């Protein structure tokens, strides 16, 4: 896999450095991320799960007009991806 411009590669230094041949001669930016404790990760997962449950409860209310041309294009694209629309 060859990195495209503005590709984000994330992992430990050892994981990223294994791709050194692919990145040779390219400009790169290294950002050292703060480690999160297991407790912090669990709290974030809990919040994300609650948010996803709330989103799943939302009801889509179709407008009382026919879809615009742009909406038709978006609906068709989403249908091709397997999403269902009323």
Image: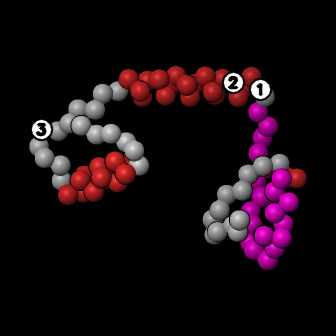
Q: Which of the two marks, 1 or 3, is nearer to us in this view?
A: 3
Q: Please provide percent x and percent y for residue 74.
A: 31, 53
Q: Nearer the viewer, residue 61 or 39?
A: 61
- Reading the image, the residue beneath label 3 is 64
Please name the predominant secondary structure of the magenta segment in the image. Answer: loop
Query: Does residue 28 appear left or right of residue 15 in this picture?
Result: left
- Reading the image, the residue beneath label 1 is 38
Q: Is residue 10 above or below residue 56?
A: below
Q: Name the residue: 43% across, 23% down.
A: 54
Query: Does residue 65 appear left or right of residue 24 in this picture?
Result: left
- Reading the image, the residue beneath label 2 is 42
Asked whether 86 falls inside the magenta stretch, the response is no
Residues in magenta, as a range: 15-36
Badge 2 crowding class, 10 Å Cα cut-off, few under 14, some 14 to 19, many 20 or more, is: few
Q: Name the residue: 71% across, 65% down.
A: 1
Q: Please provide percent x and percent y for residue 67.
A: 18, 49
Q: Name the residue: 34% across, 48% down.
A: 79
Q: Please provide percent x and percent y for residue 43.
A: 66, 23
The local secondary structure at tag 3 comes to loop
Q: Are marks 1 and 2 in contact (CB under 8 Å)?
A: yes
């Amino acid at each position: 896999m060859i990195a495209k411009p503005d590709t984000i590669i994330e992992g430990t230094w050892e994981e990223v450095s294994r791709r050194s041949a692919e990145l040779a001669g390219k400009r790169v930016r290294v950002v050292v991320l703060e480690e999160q404790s297991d407790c912090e990760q669990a709290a974030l997962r809990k919040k994300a799960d609650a948010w996803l449950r709330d989103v799943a409860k939302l009801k889509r209310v179709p407008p009382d007009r026919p879809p615009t041309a742009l909406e038709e294009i978006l609906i068709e694209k989403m249908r091709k991806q397997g999403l269902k629309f009323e």
